[in-house]
């Protein structure tokens, strides 16, 4: 039994490490909320602690704080996250992330956005990354058919951001770059049984196009019954000029099931 627990723990830590040891680029589309219809301020805090003791000692801390503010055509939110994991007194996850975004509904189809971001990730040698940017987001189409219980949404965003990075090399590598940040998001829901989502990012140095980053995330959920569903997801990241000892690409595929009761 102890051997089985140790094997399970090792596999869990391996998967956890590889799912977090990716590039610092973050899909901020996942941070948006669409069900905030009332004006006002809301706050949420989450704290998860995992601990395992036996043949291997394992501790994981995951914290998240979020606040949302809505006032007529204005919407703002901020998210702060921190993760740390230690196994047998050795830290193998240590990263933090902060994102703040203000959004103004300029017209029915166009939104203007301003955002700030700060993050670090010890295991991709990222001492510090700071972003400040602005851009436009447009709704290409938003379709909802009650008869067919079908919803389709397609968004496109373009913008510019100033990026400051400090990479933990010897000596420390520091860069200041203005990047174009562009994305598209597609969401499809059918009869509460089928959900498909895709987000793609393309960010490049406006002075040197050979320096660019790609991010593509896709997720699919198919409900087999009311309480049983199949889930699959894909996450692909590419950095044309990553830090030393970090590979250019990172691909993660996952499949699973969910049961509600």
Image (cartoon, rainbow, N blue to C red):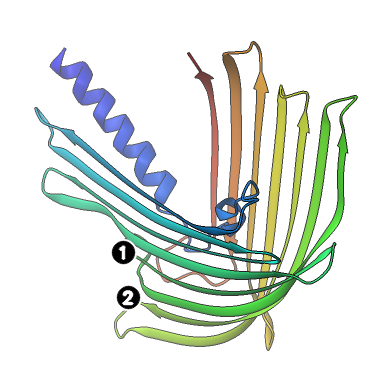
Find residue 161 and name its label: none
Query: Is 240 or 204 nearer to us in this picture?
Result: 204
**69 relative position to 216: left or right:** left
For residue 102, what is the image quadrant?
bottom right
Q: Position of residue 20 (x, y in %)?
A: 40, 50
Q: Position of residue 216 (x, y in %)?
A: 65, 52
Which label's residue is closer to the chain start, 1 or 2? 1
Classify 160 as above or below 33. below
Q: Position of residue 213 (x, y in %)?
A: 62, 67
Q: Gap in Å between the C-alphas at discs 1 and 2?
A: 8 Å
Image point 62% across, 52% down: which residue?
38
Image point 70% across, 75% down: which residue?
135
On the rendered image, what quadrant is the N terminus found in? top left
Q: Position of residue 95 (x, y in %)?
A: 33, 60
Label 2 sits on residue: 168
Label 1 sits on residue: 122
Image point 44% across, 80% down: which residue?
165
Image point 33% across, 78% down: which residue?
169
Give the SS element for disc 2: loop
In front: label 1 or label 2: 1
Callout 1–callout 2 Cβ contact below 8 Å? yes
Q: Please give the count of numbered marks on the rendered protein.
A: 2
Classify 259 as above or below 240. above
Mark 1, other Cα within 10 Å: few <14 / some 14–19 / many ≥20:
some
**229 relative position to 165: left or right:** right
Give the SS element for disc 1: helix
Query: Is 80 or 97 nearer to us in this picture?
Result: 80
Mark 2, other Cα within 10 Å: few <14 / some 14–19 / many ≥20:
some
């Amino acid at each position: 039994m102890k051997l089985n627990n140790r094997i399970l723990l090792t596999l869990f830590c391996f998967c956890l490490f590889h799912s977090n040891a990716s590039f610092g680029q973050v899909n901020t589309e996942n941070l948006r909320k669409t069900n905030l219809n009332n004006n006002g301020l809301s706050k949420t805090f989450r704290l998860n602690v995992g601990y395992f003791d036996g043949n291997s000692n394992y501790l994981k801390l995951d914290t998240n704080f979020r606040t949302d503010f809505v006032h007529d055509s204005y919407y703002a939110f901020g998210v702060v996250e921190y993760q740390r994991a230690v196994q047998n007194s050795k830290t193998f996850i240590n990263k933090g992330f902060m994102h703040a975004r203000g959004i103004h509904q300029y017209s029915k189809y166009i939104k203007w956005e301003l955002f700030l971001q700060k993050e670090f990730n010890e295991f991709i040698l990222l001492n510090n990354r700071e972003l400040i940017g602005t851009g436009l987001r447009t709704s290409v189409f938003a379709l909802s058919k009650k008869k067919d219980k079908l919803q389709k949404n397609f968004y496109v965003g373009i913008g510019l951001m100033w990026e400051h990075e400090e990479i933990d090399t010897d000596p420390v590598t520091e860069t200041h770059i203005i990047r174009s940040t562009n994305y598209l998001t597609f969401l499809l829901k059918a009869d509460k049984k089928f959900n498909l989502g895709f987000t793609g990012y393309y960010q490049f140095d406006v002075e040197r196009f050979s320096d660019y980053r790609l991010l593509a995330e896709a997720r699919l959920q198919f409900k087999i019954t009311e309480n049983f569903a199949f889930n699959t997801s894909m996450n692909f990241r590419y950095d044309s000029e990553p830090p030393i000892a970090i590979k250019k690409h990172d691909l993660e595929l996952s499949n699973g099931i969910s049961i509600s009761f």
